[in-house]
Image (cartoon, rainbow, N blue to C red):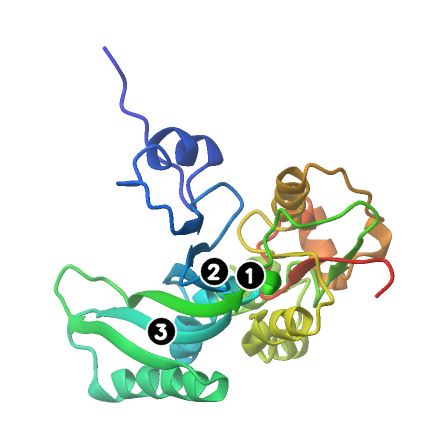
């Protein structure tokens, strides 16, 4: 008798992606330039010979409510930007638990609107509602952006001799979400109240949209990847494998806050595995 296997929490493994999901993508379409694949957080299809559309979708959950609208935009927009796409349109579904106050809804929607206006993005459709089966605020957002054929960037574009660029600190997302959660009590001897307040202020830096757009528009980059679930220890091999290259890093030179190192030591793990949304991994030509 076959045993049912319970899925682990988080994004599914590459093995399950490749065995269950990738073989079942519907009818093949010749206009799809980049279909779903391991290590690629966006898809690309052809509008015409020179114009491509980049599309990414992401769940939004477990986020401090005061910043929920910010991440409805930035999670998916970051994935579009690392492919060289300039975000243009947003679609999102916002699901609310019973008894949600109108003021809370207004705050979330106002945040989404503000980020869209900041980056010139229009919300073309969506769905919002309150349901008894929804235990907490949830959203799924999809961002669409455009790029040209010569400006399309993928994780497979790294070249021999490229330098490895990382923006912000590794594990910053982990630290931010820790100080906002119940887990903070377990690490309060490492992160004092003053440091915790400083870390909380970094929450709106958990996006790679600004730097990804800057790098791609100026032609400074061969490949990019947002360092999300699995941290640098997942993102860097994904870029290397997609590009058919190896890599060398010097761990002592990696941008890490002292608190990140201490927490990793206390829990006998590596900070390189900490989720680091908002930290951009980029392969940069050595002459830049």
6 displayed left or right of 66: left
User: Which element type, helix, strand or loop, lies under badge 1?
Assistant: helix
Q: Are marks 2 and 1 in contact (CB under 8 Å)?
A: yes
Q: Position of residue 204 (x, y in %)?
A: 55, 78
In the rendering, which numbered label is found on residue 149? Answer: 1
Q: Earlier in the sequence, mark 2 or mark 1?
A: 2
User: Which element type, helix, strand or loop, lies under badge 3?
Assistant: strand
Residue denoted by label 2:
49
Q: Quadrant of the C terminus?
A: bottom right
Cα gap from disc 2 to disc 1, whole angstroms: 8 Å
Q: Earlier in the sequence, mark 3 or mark 1?
A: 3
Q: Residue furthest front?
A: 49
Nearer-the-camera pick, 126 or 83: 83
Q: Which is in the foreground here, disc 2 or disc 1?
A: 2
Q: Position of residue 99 (x, y in %)?
A: 16, 76
Q: Quadrant of residue 73?
A: bottom left
- Disc 2 crowd rating (10 Å Cα; few below 14, some 14-19, many 20+) is few
Q: Which residue: 68% across, 42% down? A: 240
Nearer-the-camera pick, 79 or 156: 156
Cα gap from disc 3 to disc 1, whole angstroms: 22 Å
Q: Quadrant of residue 242?
A: top right
Q: Position of residue 252 (x, y in %)?
A: 86, 53
Q: Which is in the foreground here, disc 3 or disc 2?
A: 2
Q: Which residue: 66% across, 44% down? A: 233
Residue denoted by label 3:
90
Q: Earlier in the sequence, mark 3 or mark 2?
A: 2
In the rendering, which numbered label is found on residue 65? Answer: none
Q: Position of residue 18 (x, y in %)?
A: 42, 32
Q: Residue furthest top?
A: 1
């Amino acid at each position: 008798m076959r045993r049912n296997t319970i899925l682990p929490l988080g994004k599914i493994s590459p093995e399950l992606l490749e065995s269950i999901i990738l073989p079942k993508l519907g009818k093949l379409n010749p206009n799809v330039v980049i279909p779903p694949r391991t290590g690629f957080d966006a898809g690309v299809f052809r509008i015409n010979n020179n114009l491509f559309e980049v599309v990414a979708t992401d769940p939004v959950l477990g986020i401090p409510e005061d910043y929920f609208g910010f991440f409805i935009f930035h999670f998916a927009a970051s994935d579009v930007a690392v492919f060289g796409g300039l975000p243009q349109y947003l679609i999102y579904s916002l699901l609310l638990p019973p008894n949600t106050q109108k003021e809370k809804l207004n705050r979330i929607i106002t945040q989404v609107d503000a980020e869209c206006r900041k980056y010139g993005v229009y919300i073309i459709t969506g769905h919002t509602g309150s349901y008894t089966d929804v235990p907490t605020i949830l959203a799924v957002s999809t961002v669409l952006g455009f790029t040209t054929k010569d400006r399309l960037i993928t994780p497979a574009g790294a070249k021999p001799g490229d330098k490895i660029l990382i923006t912000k600190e590794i594990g910053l997302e982990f630290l931010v979400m820790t100080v906002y959660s119940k887990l903070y009590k377990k690490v309060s001897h490492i992160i004092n109240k003053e440091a915790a307040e400083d870390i909380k202020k970094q929450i709106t830096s958990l996006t790679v949209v600004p730097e990804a757009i800057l790098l791609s528009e100026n032609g400074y980059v061969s490949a990019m990847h947002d360092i999300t679930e699995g941290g640098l220890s997942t993102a860097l091999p994904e870029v290397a494998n997609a590009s058919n290259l190896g890599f060398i890093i010097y761990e002592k030179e990696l941008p890490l806050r002292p608190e990140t190192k201490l927490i990793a030591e206390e829990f006998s793990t590596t900070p390189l595995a900490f989720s680091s949304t908002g930290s951009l991994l980029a392969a940069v030509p050595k002459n830049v």
